[in-house]
Amino acid sequence: MLFWLILFFPLLGAFLNGLVLRKVSPTVSHILGTSALIAAFVCALLTYLQFLAGGGQAQVITGMEWIEAGTFKAPFNFILDRLSGLMLLIITGIGSLIHIYAGGYMHEEKATYRFFSYLNLFVFMMLLLVLGDNLLVMFIGWEGVGLCSYLLIGYWYEDDKNAAAGMKAFLVNRIGDIGFLLGIFLTFKYFHTVSFSELKQMILSAGAQLNGEQIEAIGWITLALFVGACGKSAQMPLYVWLPDAMAGPTPVSALIHAATMVTAGIYMMTRLNFLFYLAPTTQMIVASVGAVTALFAATIALVQYDIKKVLAYSTVSQLGYMVLGCGVGAYSAGVFHLFTHACFKALLFLGAGSVIVAMHHKQDMREMGGLRKYMPVTHLVMLIGVLAIIGFPGLSGFFSKDEILWRAWTGGDQYHIQWGLGALAAVCTSFYMVRLLMLTFYGKNRSDHHTQEHLHETSVVMWGPLVVLAILSAAVGYLNVPHIIHIPGLTNLLFEHYLDPVISIPPQVAEHWHHLHAEYPQSLEWAIMAVSVAGMAISSLLAISMYSNGFGRIANSLGSAFKGAHRVLTNKYYVDEFYDSYIVTPLRDMSQFLWKVVDVLIIDGIVNGVGQAFMLIGGLSSFRMSGSLHRHGMVMVVGIICMLTVLFF
């Protein structure tokens, strides 16, 4: 019963806010939407504890018969295991904190029923995505979060830029979804099922022998599914929607970019890990795309001044780390970084939202500075979030990010380049996040006099969830402390084997992936860790020296010395301009041609022309009816004479 309530409460909240209580006050909308999420979290927590108490074995929960056509069957079933259970807690737990915060952030809105209805519906769709036991149920949630992201990003649709950002997110994700659908079709064609449970049993069953056609098909299936993951999880070349998604309210940014929609691709690949293990070429592509994306987005973030844009590109970069973890076969490491990232990135986005509210919705860090004095709580929690994401020893990002880099290095010589890209991305992350902290909270305040007069800490409704997220950001990393670090009273690597029942290497390729369980010298692990920490420390100190007093001499000198590189990074490598010039504009011109020339002039011209020609012929061959009895009689007589003439001659 509790399981069904997890899905029921968010859907009920969306229904009541969106269709029933539309004229209630914003406070009532907030309480209703938040209560629905808190209730779902309580049910999820109790369900998860019962599940672990029962042994933690995967359970397929029967829903209803859904699609059945010939040999194709897709029941509406759900799966509850360690992976979906963890995602339940992340989605409902952090989602609840974001809902609480949203009441303070949106307090100036006259009517928020639509906003909280969309938020609740978004969470419901995300729950459907992670709980579905087959690819089609997952796809409903997959498309549902895409729809809700469109609605939430374009929430202030009266602004053309916001509406365009929502449309961009929707369309770019549709490109990825073509790959996802192709993967579903190929899966059924070659394996005659789309059920995760049945597919896993088929692949892993003792003595299972896949024929050559199926082995080749798995490569194409995983590649097609990864295209879908590139859309949802904002990987190159489909990452361009996510930075523009900042147009929506900040709670939306936190919900989409931290714990839910953007992690869908990582969740999907982890769920189907047994297929991806059978496709080493796809795994190499996944690892390479993740590593390149991590560094690419990190370099763009180095020079951005919009506080939310910096965090958006940071999200793209951190997702690249998760994808890199999946690509090297370290799915547990990827999911653990998903978990820690959900905590500290939600914290950073919501902290940025508090700054934006205090600054009267200004987002340019060049107009900030010195906010530590006015917003001590926000400063403290943002400091914890920054230290967590840059991998400061002892905080969550240190344990999760370094685990991925360690797995990349030990994954074999073929992954050393990806490790190098990931390590460089980590150095860039430290620089741009410390830069954000310095420009926002330190130095002299650069805002106008009116803004300075009204600067103050936000309400407890907003900073309360930040404190909880800060505690999580500092603490959750200790669920996966490496063996080489001994902390008295703490069991190391609690998370390392947590996903073992979910992550299974097929026996056919166990030898190829033997490095996942190999033992390595502790000195090597210390060396890899030292390189990471040293890079973090050096880049952080460089950022402090450059931006401790705003825009110092070093920053200006570097900007002047490398004008070309600075211009390229500021304009985000001109990727949007390239897409607009070579993809969007040609497609728009082609559409205009097909509409105005092919459709209107040619097709409509032919169809309408034929009709008009016959109308003309009919008009010329008929007499105009005037109602005159004599004329009608004459026409009849002439007609009879013509008929008789034809008959006789």
Image (cartoon, rainbow, N blue to C red):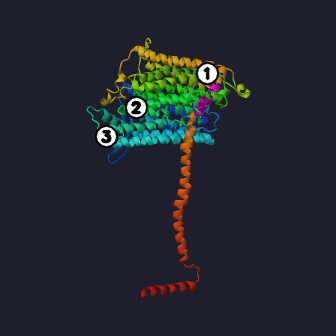
Name the residue rendered at 55%, 76% in the picture.
620
Residue placed under numbered mark 3 in the picture: 213
Amino acid type, label 3: Glu
Q: Which mark is nearer the camera, 1 or 2?
A: 2
| Quarter of the N terminus within the rendering | top left
> Distance from label 3 to label 2 (Cα)?
19 Å
Name the residue rendered at 43%, 21% in the picture.
406
| Quarter of the C terminus within the rendering | bottom left
Q: Which mark is residue 283?
A: 2
Which residue of the protein is positioned furthest toward the right in this rendering?
A: 449
Report x, y in % for residue 217: 35, 39
Mark 1 or mark 2, earlier in chain: 2
Q: Which mark is nearer the camera, 3 or 1?
A: 3
Q: Which mark is residue 379?
A: 1
Under tag 1, what secondary structure? Answer: helix
Res 171 visible? yes
In the picture provided, is 313 more to the left or to the right than 355? Answer: left
Report x, y in % for residue 58: 36, 30
Q: Is disc 3 surrounded by few (<14), some (14 to 19) or many (20+) residues within 10 Å? A: few
Report x, y in % for residue 231: 48, 37
Which residue of the protein is positioned furthest toward the top in this rendering?
A: 488
Q: Main secondary structure of the magenta part?
A: helix
